Image (cartoon, rainbow, N blue to C red):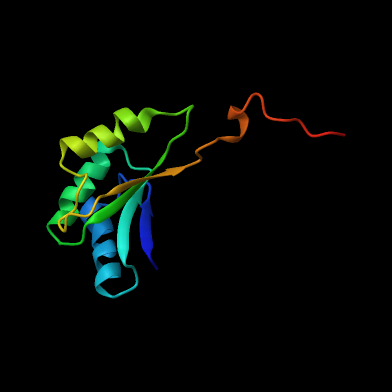
Amino acid sequence: MDLWLVHTWSDTTPADETLSVLEWAVASGRARYVGVSNYSGWQAAHAATLMSASRVPLVANEVEYSPMNRIPEDEQVAAGRAHGLPQDLQGRKRRVLTRRPLPEPSLPNRPRKCH
């Protein structure tokens, strides 16, 4: 697998336990890269800090981002910059992946189906 993402922060499972699975996935060859999804800015920064000790960097943060939801510009990206996350240990750039770039009801002037 090229990229393994952990979806959604858990308040009941310790972050180091969740992230140790990502370390295992890379070490065992099951994943080339790892990242997170649906994490807030501070959660992604905390996860990246924990992973930096293992030398397996988080290379992606998948967030909902669209013209209607630009919160990641202020929250996730800013938190990443504040915690030094734009680059990993090898100098590669981390990426913010977007999902739902155009939510279904957000296009008011889209063509209507002809009956």
Outermost residue, right direction?
115
| Figure quadrant of residue 69 | top left
**49, above or below 78, in the image:** below
Percent x, y for residue 7?
Answer: 39, 50
Residue 102 placement, left or right of 18: right
Outermost residue, bottom direction?
28
**Front residue (pair 66, 45):** 66
Percent x, y for residue 4?
Answer: 37, 60
Percent x, y for residue 37?
Answer: 37, 47
Residue under the image location 26 percent in, 41 percent down:
43
Residue 68 placement, left or right of 4: right
**Front residue (pair 48, 17):** 48
**9, above or below 53, in the image:** above
Quadrant position of the N terminus in the picture? bottom left
**115, above or below 108, in the image:** below
Count of residue discs: 0
Quadrant position of the C terminus in the picture? top right
Residue under the image location 17 percent in, 54 percent down:
91
